[in-house]
Amino acid sequence: MIYPRTQRIFQFVSGLWVGSFITVGFLVVPVLFSTLGDRQVAGMVAANLFKITAYTGVTISALLMALSNRLVKRGVSQYRVIRWILLLMLACFVGAAFIIIPWMNSLRDQALYLGLAVRESTNAILFNRLHGVSSGLFLIQSLLGLTLVWRATKNAD
């Protein structure tokens, strides 16, 4: 038996979600840095946007995982692969939300406490490495998200 309403809800939520975090990462944040004159302020705003995106990502990927589990139990086999994609996305979002972002925020706060920008502090190299890891994770999340939406809408009526 096919469950079109559940699948449509899944497609709708996943499309909005993936579109929103890709928009934040590839449109909003670059505009922030190009528009605001102070890179430190732009970085702090971007950090808050990415923190919200990461927490939202944890929540929505977990909810979509539960929904895809329900669909697989009902015999919709295309959601077997989708569950793996969601699991990888969830792992990326958890790593960003609970490890990388707090660590970067801590380094930024330490620098601000000393009256410095993080790029002027002794932790600048570590911060840049974490930023690189964070950027790489975001790229992976984006590619996984696009794959998720592509697979979820495959053979859509």
Image (cartoon, rainbow, N blue to C red):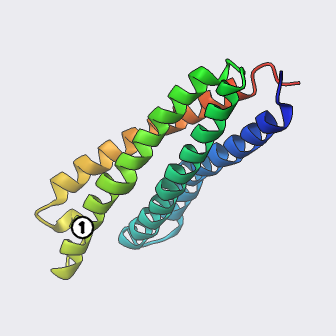
Which quadrant, please, contains the C terminus?
top right
Q: Position of residue 38 (x, y in %)?
A: 40, 72
Residue displayed at 53% across by 66% down? 35
Question: Horizontal and vertical percent for residue 97?
Answer: 39, 55
Secondary element type, mark 1: helix
Residue closest to the eye, 80 or 134: 80
Residue at (69%, 30%) from the top-left corner? 71
Residue placed farthest to the right in the image? 157
Q: Quadrant of residue 155?
A: top right
Position in image of residue 85 (x %, y %): 53, 29
Question: Residue drawn 10% across and 63% down?
Answer: 122
Q: Is residue 82 above or below residue 127?
A: above
In the displayed structure, does residue 70 sit left or right of residue 50?
right
Q: Is residue 136 above or below residue 38?
A: above
| Location of residue 113 (image quadrant) | bottom left
Q: Is 25 above or below relative to 110?
A: above
Residue 152 horizontal side relative to residue 97, left or right? right
**Can you identify the residue that label 1 sits on?**
106
> Which residue in the rendered view is the most extreme toward the left?
122
Q: Foreground: 22 or 6? A: 6
Number of numbered markers: 1
Mark 1 packing: few (<14 Cα in 10 Å), some, or many (20+)?
Answer: few
Is residue 30 left or right of 128 when viewed as pictured? right
Figure check: 135 above or below 48: above
The quadrant of the image that shows the N terminus is top right
The residue type indicated by label 1 comes to Ser
Is 98 or 71 nearer to us in this picture? 71
Give percent across and percent down for residue 45.
46, 69
